[in-house]
Image: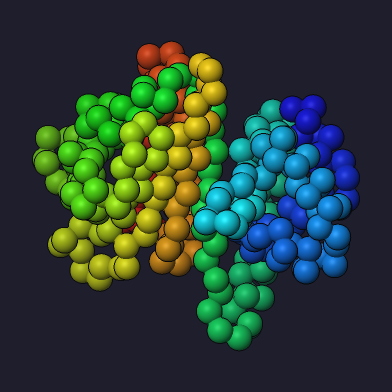
Amino acid sequence: MDSVFKALADPTRRLLLDRLHEHNGQTLRELCERLDMARQSATQHLDILERANLVTVVRRGRERLHYLNPVPIHEIDERWISGFDKPRLQAISAIRNQAEEYAMTDTNGPTPVPTYVYVTYIRAGAEQVWQALTDADLTARYWGHANVSDWQPGSKWEHRRVDGSGAVDVVGRVIEAEPPTRLVITFEDAPDAESPREPSVVTFLVEPHHDIVRLTVTHENLANLEMLGGISRGWPAVLANLKSLLETGETLPQAPWEMSPAHD
């Protein structure tokens, strides 16, 4: 927590986070151009933000894309704000967000939907995390749905309910599978959906370090801002449940959010 407060104490680093909040997934060049900042200076600030886990770097070929990671800020919210006067603050935030939404409707052209990136650290082995991502029984425990597939590139996968109905809420295909470090799948509406949308793409990157694993989930090709809002609530809940299951053997007491493209 100290590293987070230290990183946030600098106005330049706060400005970098603001720019990533406006448009996530920027390269170093793009950030420097928007802030009129030298590359060396921006690199130093971004390194501090990355060490504080406020910024996540995802490689795309030779490019390094920078994403705002909300986890540490969420932890500050839970520790320092939630127990005090959160209802009033939420009301103020809702008014502000509504005003910002109206402001966006006045701009020319559609509002771009950013890629969603979430990072969590799990005290487990890479093989354990991979099994938790691909084993139908385990996903049923922490996700509330069984993810069923043979997990071979090109194969189908299904997001099946565990209420005995056998209903499938989401389907998709496996694009890449490199156990135990990388899994890329599509998320698509169920075949009986009235207005199916273009599939989104989810990448799970498992980076082991001794007995700790860094799990990065990247969700791309989002259909709209409503979908972004839904997965922004869903992924943290699902991954917190996964983390709890692997570290303690038990899932969290509250039921996980429904987290799928079928739920806006």
Asked if residue 219 shows in the view, the reply is yes
Q: How is this picture coloured?
A: rainbow
- Write the residue at 14% across / 46% down: 167
Location of residue 20 in the rendering, given as x and y in whole percent from the top left corner: 68, 57
Front-most of 193 and 40? 40
Q: Is residue 102 left or right of residue 244?
A: right
Asked if residue 258 shows in the view, the reply is no
Note whether 255 is above or below 99 in the view shown.
above
Q: Is residue 251 left or right of residue 61?
A: left
Front-most of 151 and 200? 151
- Write the residue at 45% across / 40% down: 205
Residue at the extreme front: 62
The image quarter in which residue 131 lies: top left
Note whether 259 is above or below 21 in the view shown.
above
The image quarter in which residue 194 lies: bottom left
Q: Is residue 94 left or right of residue 203?
A: right
Note whether 11 is above or below 242 in the view shown.
below
Location of residue 145 in the rendering, given as x and y in whole percent from the top left corner: 26, 37
Residue at the extreme bottom: 108
Q: Is residue 243 left or right of residue 255?
A: right
Location of residue 152 in the rendering, given as x and y in whole percent from the top left corner: 21, 43
Residue at the extreme top: 248
- Write the residue at 45% across / 34% down: 206
Front-most of 240 and 92? 240
Note whether 64 is above or below 108 in the view shown.
above
Q: Quadrant of the C terminus?
A: bottom left
Q: Quadrant of the N terminus?
A: top right
Location of residue 158 in the rendering, given as x and y in whole percent from the top left corner: 20, 46
Residue at the extreme left: 165
